[in-house]
Image: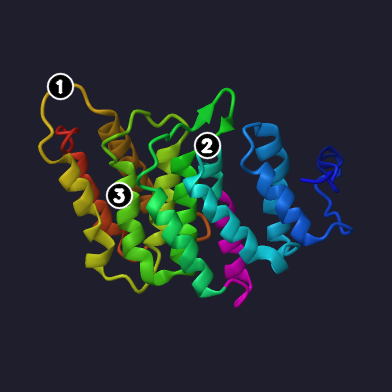
Amino acid sequence: MTADLVDWSSIAASDFCYPEAVPASRLVEELSAMLVSSDPKVRDDYAYTAAARWIREGRLDAVLEVLGDRATTWFTHAEIQARTFAPLILCSVLTRGDSVPGLVMKEAAERWYAGFTAWCPAEQDTRGWDDSLGWLHAVAHGADAAAAFAKALPQHRTELLELCAYRMAAPQADYRYTQLEEARLARALTRVLQDPGLTCEQATSWLTVVAEALNGGGHGPVPIWAFNTFATLQSLHLHLTRGIADEGTPPHAEAVAAQLVDLLCLPYYWLA
């Protein structure tokens, strides 16, 4: 890359005032390089903070699909921080597209969706935080993107419910949720369930994935994936009971919550 046109430390010091003199195409190039950096200050404090703000403000509308396509390539990147910041950028892009009809073509969203669904349940490095790399948050960022995809591509809502179920019950898990990943998953599931077009069966059928994963559990220590699953189910029950501020509760919240309790009675056999 040629010499930077942007002094990112100065941009940060100015509260990320948009650099009008820099072409948006060049900004995408610089941001794309920084968003996969192993340096959390470069990736998170500079690049993501700038990208999220400028996307929200509409500053990058002309290159929004380019940025979405670029982020989707990171799902197969060799380094974990690149893979986990891909859904974060796609979430911002999809949210901006939702606020401006026609800004993001359905064909583009479908391309991104294909890359996302191939990565999300399969990612094995699910750490929330690394002392060297900073925030990674594969589960939380993936959950946020799932909710954004559900809004952009409502025809995939039932698939996204199942995807979240496969993510929480992934048997290869060796990381116990410690950074509120279960709450981010629960919020995403609640938002997907908000679709008024979902039937009661569609709103609850994804729980079969969880029930099958838990089937056959016996005596002995609780596996990490099972702990994560139970933590997510508890959080989801709370979300369905209280609702999300300014969004309320999903149409079939009571039916979903009832099935959650049935699953939670497996470890908490003393519940009434």
Mark closer to the observer (1, 2) = 2
Q: Decide which of 86, 183 is in the foreground and name it.
A: 86
Closer to the N terminus: mark 1 or mark 3?
3
Q: Decide which of 164, 60 is in the foreground and name it.
A: 60
Instruction: Provide residue 45's location: percent of width, then percent of height.
Output: 70, 38
Query: Residue placed at 32% from the left, 42% from the top?
Result: 168
Q: Residues within 10 Å of mark 3 (few under 14, many from 20)?
A: many
**The C terminus appears in which quarter of the rendering?**
top left
Residue 112 visible in the shown view: yes
Closer to the N terminus: mark 1 or mark 2?
2
Q: Amino acid at mark 2?
A: Glu
Q: Residues within 10 Å of mark 1 (few under 14, many from 20)?
A: few
Query: Residue placed at 48% from the left, 65% from the top?
Result: 111
Mark 1 vs mark 3, CA separation in Å? 23 Å
The secondary element bearing badge 3 is classed as: helix
Instruction: Provide residue 114's location: percent of width, then percent of height.
Output: 42, 61
The secondary element bearing badge 1 is classed as: loop
The magenta region covers 88-104
Q: Is residue 169 left or right of residue 16?
A: left
Residue 48 visible in the shown view: no
- Image disc number at residue 79: 2
Q: Give the answer, above or below, for where 222 lies relative to 18.
A: above
Q: Amino acid at mark 3?
A: Ala
Q: Decide which of 114, 223 is in the foreground and name it.
A: 114
**The N terminus appears in which quarter of the rendering?**
top right
Residue 170, magenta (yes or no):
no
Residue labelled with disc 1: 220
Mark closer to the observer (3, 2) = 2
Residue labelled with disc 3: 165
Most prominent secondary structure in the magenta stretch?
Answer: helix
